[in-house]
Image (tube, rainbow, N blue to C red):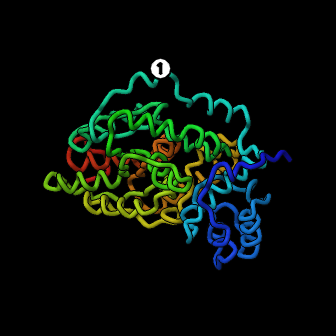
Amino acid sequence: MRVLSGIGEKMGLNFDPEKCFNCNTYACLTKCKYLNYDFDRAKAERLKLAKGEYSRVLEDCVTCYACEEYCPYNNHPFYQIVELQERYGLDVAPRPIVKQLVKMYAAKEKDLVTITKVGRKALSLCLFPDLKRNVEGKLFNLPIILGRHVFCNLVYLHFARNSIILERANQTIENISKYGIEELICFHDECYGFFNSYAKAYGIEVPFRTVHLFDFLYSKLKELEDDIRKLNLRVAYQRPCSNRLSPETDEVLDKIFELIGVERVEREYDRENALCCGAVFRMQGRDDLADDVQRRNIQDMVESKANFAVFNCPMCYVTLAEAVAKKGLMPVLVSDLCRLAIGEVPRFPGGD
């Protein structure tokens, strides 16, 4: 097996192996929805990882991010897994796909010429220009930045290419700083996770403040509370994998739902037990796994008696929207649900 030497040391991950040696839960692996490890096996494999040794986890990991949330010590098990996958030369997805992704999303010189000062506060739409229509009106009256030059590149965690993220991180942050931004609202969980989990784990300086979309929406809705019309909806929420990097924001979503009159139904595959949308599994060539998690996830939504399926991640929405609609659930983004509550988008069927 090909082994790349010295990657972990060069990357500088803030990781303390002693926390793994002294752990009494190994929740990072025992709680995983995909590995199905008991305590003894989880302990044995986690200690291998802590020592930088090869572990079966490196092949079995589906890159769902969840162990970052499960670890009680904030000791970054997922980042270490990805480092080791790359160190040992594992292909978690077909090489041509990974090579094309790395090339496709690299910033080009023409992207940089679009940078002009936009003011103190702005909203990042990352690589999702189609979202512009979802961030209009009174809630989103602020400049927008987007493009490959402001892309966090965190998607490469799914493809065992941590080195690409680190290679591009400082330039991405510098590009955003050139806009004159002091406060950046992150639409995508992955972008927020890059600045507030990943960058901190690797000691990367971020010179501006970042705000998660949910914190931003809740604050704006409180300002416009007199305009809110309670929606009286039951919704099944698709929690995205990258929200595992900022689990505290999931509680803010509950506050948003309460404010706009939405019930987040109790179901098996939500919160800590959330299942992925399956998009990355298909890109990794794991079609059987993608089919299975999508089937179980959507059936769980249907059985919850929700009338809406709510998404925050654009990729989750694209992947599952048509499928949930065929099952009778209305797919909608959190941002549009909030705009609906203040009367800025047409009424969806299913509400009062």
Instruction: Tell me which residue sits at (51%, 40%) in the image.
Output: 170
Give residue 138's quadrant in the image.
Answer: top left
Task: Look at label 1 and name its amino acid.
Answer: Lys
Above/below status of 149 relative to 312:
above
Q: Is residue 332 visible?
A: no
Is 210 situated left or right of 155 in this image? left
> Could you say where residue 40 lies in the image, as x and y percent from the top left?
75, 76
Instruction: Tell me which residue sits at (70%, 74%) in the image.
Output: 21
Instruction: Tell me which residue sits at (84%, 45%) in the image.
Output: 2
Give residue 260's quadrant in the image.
Answer: bottom left
Q: Residues within 10 Å of mark 1 (few under 14, many from 20)?
A: few
Above/below status of 180 relative to 8:
above
Q: Secondary structure at mark 1?
A: helix
* Residue on which the image places disc 1: 110
- Along the line of sight, the residue nearer the viewer: 45 or 209: 209
- Along the line of sight, the residue nearer the viewer: 119 or 39: 119
Is 219 situated left or right of 207 in this image? left
* Image quarter of the C terminus: bottom left
> Could you say where residue 246 lies in the image, as x and y percent from the top left?
46, 58
- Along the line of sight, the residue nearer the viewer: 159 or 152: 152
> Could you say where residue 25 lies in the image, as x and y percent from the top left?
64, 77
Above/below status of 311 relative to 74:
above
